[in-house]
Image (cartoon, rainbow, N blue to C red):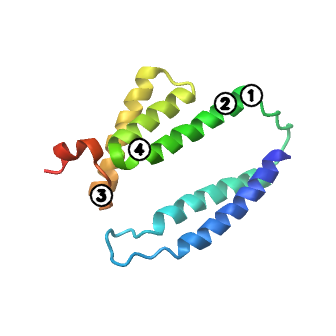
Amino acid sequence: MYVRLFAAVWLLVCAFLAVIAWGFQAPFSYDPVGPRAYPLLLLTLMAAAALWLLCKPSDEPTPPISWPLALRVGLCVAALLAYALLFESLGFILSTALAGFALGLLFGGRPLPSALSGALMGGLLYLLFDYLLDVPLPLGLFAAFLES
């Protein structure tokens, strides 16, 4: 029951945010994708997941929320908040690698594979966005090495 209520509220939030994101306009074109494509893509994915949670058949009852689960959710939110706050100063590559590492550990991964996957995710996503999609990303601490 709580899952369906959460899904319905989240679907409304996604619709509200999509209306706001639709109005995003750049005074000049600084990248080929534009400022509204990324938020609308994320909101579409979140709305699809909310619809799935809302409409999926429920054969088994939803387990109650436990304190360890609530702690993991809180740590996940804290890791994503730290990612957002450190994005400009550390740069995309390093902040994405650290967030990937932290979330990998949070979901039960071993330290070495979590660190390796976080580093690969930061580097490969930077290459994808910067070179293939022409989306400028902050370099942060790597600015001296990668700007040449």
Q: Name the disc covering residue 146, or none.
A: none
Q: Counting residues from the N terminus, which is met first, the one under dot 1 or under dot 3?
A: 1
Identify the disc placed on residue 86: 4
Mark 2: amino acid: Leu
Pair 4/3: label in front: 4
Q: Earlier in the sequence, mark 1 or mark 4?
A: 1
Percent of width and height locating residue 96: 40, 41
Answer yes or no: do the residues labelled 1 and 2 have beta carbons within 8 Å?
A: yes
Disc number lying in front (3 or 2) = 2
How many other residues sit within 10 Å of disc 3, few (<14), some (14-19) or many (≥20)? few
Q: Of helix, strand and loop, which one carries label 3?
A: helix
In this rendering, is residue 122 above or below 13?
above
Whole-number angstrom distance, CA of label 1 to CA of label 3: 43 Å
- Between 121 and 94, which is closer to the camera in this rendering? 94
Q: Which residue is mark 1?
A: 67
The amino acid beneath tag 1 is Trp
Q: CA distance from mark 3 to mark 2?
A: 38 Å
| Mark toward the viewer: 1 or 3 | 1
CB contact under 8 Å: marks 4 and 2: no
Q: Residue at x 82, y 48 (%)?
A: 57
Marks 3 and 1: in contact by CB < 8 Å? no
